[in-house]
Amino acid sequence: MPAADPARLVVLVSGAGTNLQALIDACGDPAYGARVVAVGADRDDIEGLARAERAGIPTFVRKVGQFSSREHWDLTLTESVAAFDPDVVVLAGFMKLVGSTFLRRFPDRVVNTHPALCPAFPGTSGPADALAYGVKVTGATLFVVDEGVDTGPIVAQVVVPVEDTDDVEALHERIKVAERRMLVDSVGRMAREGITVSGRRVRFGAPARAT
Ligand code: GRF
């Protein structure tokens, strides 16, 4: 039997793109079952875009400030991503909230990675907030994006210890090592098995067919 076509991933980035790089590297193995077909960003001149270009992956940039409204940006971003016909859209350090047009177009197919154990410490400073609170463990969460800030149904989580000597940078770097592994494992399973979302519960595997 011929192998199934690899799942098509579109990855959106805003920065260094180490999570993107981990996905690109994983996709080098045909058994992984996915390939990155495009990388989008909300800003120019970031290492994430350079990583895509070095790998020969098409890129696009859609900056909020170039559009007359947030809704217009969201629509254009939606169309830009849809043009690559993705099976899964991965927000990997993408520092913008996508809107309702985007989410309606790719139902249960947009995932985001957050450097904290949701529902704790949502927003853009998860590692700093965890450190300031004094938790002894934190981690990373992969979730199906909904309209809230880091509130969507959880696909996977990984726990990372907080060390007494940590500053924000050291803690975030330790989280990112675990985060990349979790992202690669989970996106690979999504590509090969699919996911089923029932309310807040997510499991790997296709939805059961009605009999
Ligand atoms: C990750 O920790 C992600 O969860 C957070 O920003 C970081 C992005 O890292 N939102 P990179 O750009 O993938 O290196």
Image (cartoon, helix red, strand yellow):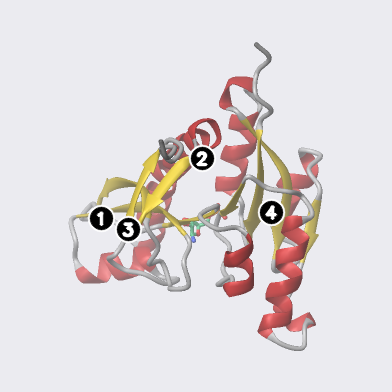
Alpha carbon of mark 4 to alpha carbon of mark 3: how far? 34 Å
Identify the mark nearer the N-term, 1 or 2: 1
Secondary structure, mark 2, is helix
Where is residue 133 shown, x and y percent of the image?
21, 70
Alpha carbon of mark 1 to alpha carbon of mark 4: how far? 29 Å
Mark 2 — residue? 187
Query: Looking at the picture, which amino acid does disc 2 mark?
Result: Val
Where is residue 50 shown, x and y percent of the image?
75, 50
Q: Does 110 sit above or below residue 125?
A: above
Secondary structure, mark 3, is loop
- At x 62% / y 22%, what residue is drawn? 29
Q: Name the image quarter holding residue 103.
A: bottom right
Residue 47 numbered tag:
4
Identify the mark nearer the N-term, 1 or 3: 1
Mark 1 — residue? 165
- Closest to the camera, between mark 1 and mark 4, is 4
Identify the mark nearer the N-term, 1 or 4: 4
205 or 121: nearer the viewer: 205
Where is residue 52 shown, x and y percent of the image?
74, 46
- Closest to the camera, between mark 3 and mark 2, is 3
Alpha carbon of mark 1 to alpha carbon of mark 3: how far? 36 Å
Task: Answer left or right for 140 relative to 27.
Answer: left
- Closest to the camera, between mark 1 and mark 2, is 2
Q: Quick check: marks 1 and 4 in contact, CB under 8 Å?
A: no
Mark 3 — residue? 200
